[in-house]
Amino acid sequence: MKSRVIQDEPSQSQSDKELRMAAITIPAVEVAARASTANGGPPVVSGRDLNRRYGEGETAVDALRGVSLDVPKGQLTAVMGPSGSGKSTLMHILAGLDTPTTGDVTIAGTSIHELNDTQLTNLRREHIGFIFQFFNLLPMLNAEENVVLPLSIAGEKRDQGWVDELMGRIGLKDRRSHRPSELSGGQQQRVAIGRALVSKPTIVFADEPTGNLDSKTSGEILELMRSSVDSYRQTTVMVTHDPRAAAIADRILFLADGLIVRDLGRSDAHEVIAVMEELSR
Ligand SMILES: Nc1ncnc2c1ncn2[C@@H]1O[C@H](COP(=O)(O)OP(=O)(O)OP(=O)(O)O)[C@@H](O)[C@H]1O
Ligand SMILES: [Mg+2]
């Protein structure tokens, strides 16, 4: 099968060097399939005029200042922007982990405005997977127990065939009985990805999933994120500071000062870097 290689030119800077070190290879058929994933169906998650204010009075911080967006099914959306621009705040609000000061979020057709805490927890459990930068695994559980934790908490019966497939997909079939302390950072993050995917959520949010990993391991994690979109049509929104990570996305949103300031389609790492430079001027 022919492959398309996303690779960057040599350059002096460290980030460019890292970019160059970890070219990501994506099969050509998958690239073609991706182009047709936006089917114009209803968005799986949307935010309307989202504002989030932390604190009060003179020390108040407006982390989001009127963000509206629709996340279409089956796409990988990357969210970029400087530190403090509101990326994590936006992810938490779209995932129902936090509520906006004003504005509304709709998850799988349900406005979170209408829900009490229990209903919101149930909605999240059914529809949302979340991957954190620092993995957030339970140390006393082994890899497989961590992966199936959302099912255990919800009291749902596990489909062992699916769990086996998932353990293979995240490359941890032979390490399923290892505890997090016995796994590398990349392996721990793969457990966290398995945990996010196990309930087949409507949407997965990942907040800097490669932020704590070396370049090669990051490349493997990104391939896993991309393949879950391509194989399972897993709608995914991923925050990243890494242009190489953004280059595997179908769409790239740029935040600055609590606002979406750019909305790009598929772009290579060079185009992403150019926009980052333009926005930082
Ligand atoms: N719990 C909080 N209390 C007060 N201010 C907060 C809180 N959480 C975030 N903020 C502020 O809101 C703004 C946006 O923060 P947020 O964490 O969303 O940024 P970010 O884009 O994710 O940054 P980074 O790239 O560093 O993770 C920042 O000014 C931050 O200091
Ligand atoms: Mg953040």
Image: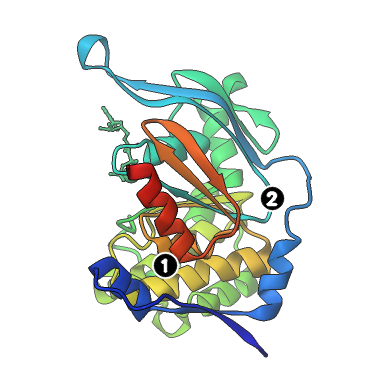
Query: Callout 2 environment at 10 Å: few (<14), some (14 to 19), or many (20+)?
Result: many
Q: Mark 2: which amino acid?
A: Lys
Q: Which residue is mark 1?
A: 191
Assign the C terminus to one quadrant of the image.
Answer: top left
Q: Which residue is mark 2?
A: 73
Q: Secondary structure at mark 1?
A: helix
Q: Which mark is residue 140?
A: none
Tell me which numbered mark, 2 or 1, is placed earlier along the sequence.
Answer: 2
Assign the N terminus to one quadrant of the image.
Answer: bottom right
Residue depicted at x 71% and y 78%: 29
Answer with the quarter of the image where residue 219 lies.
bottom left
Q: Mark 1: which amino acid?
A: Val
Label 2 within 8 A of ligand 1 by Cβ:
no
Q: Quadrant of ligand 2?
A: top left
Residue depicted at x 42% and y 56%: 274
Answer with the quarter of the image where residue 175 lies.
bottom left
Given residues 223 and 138, the one toward you in this image is 223
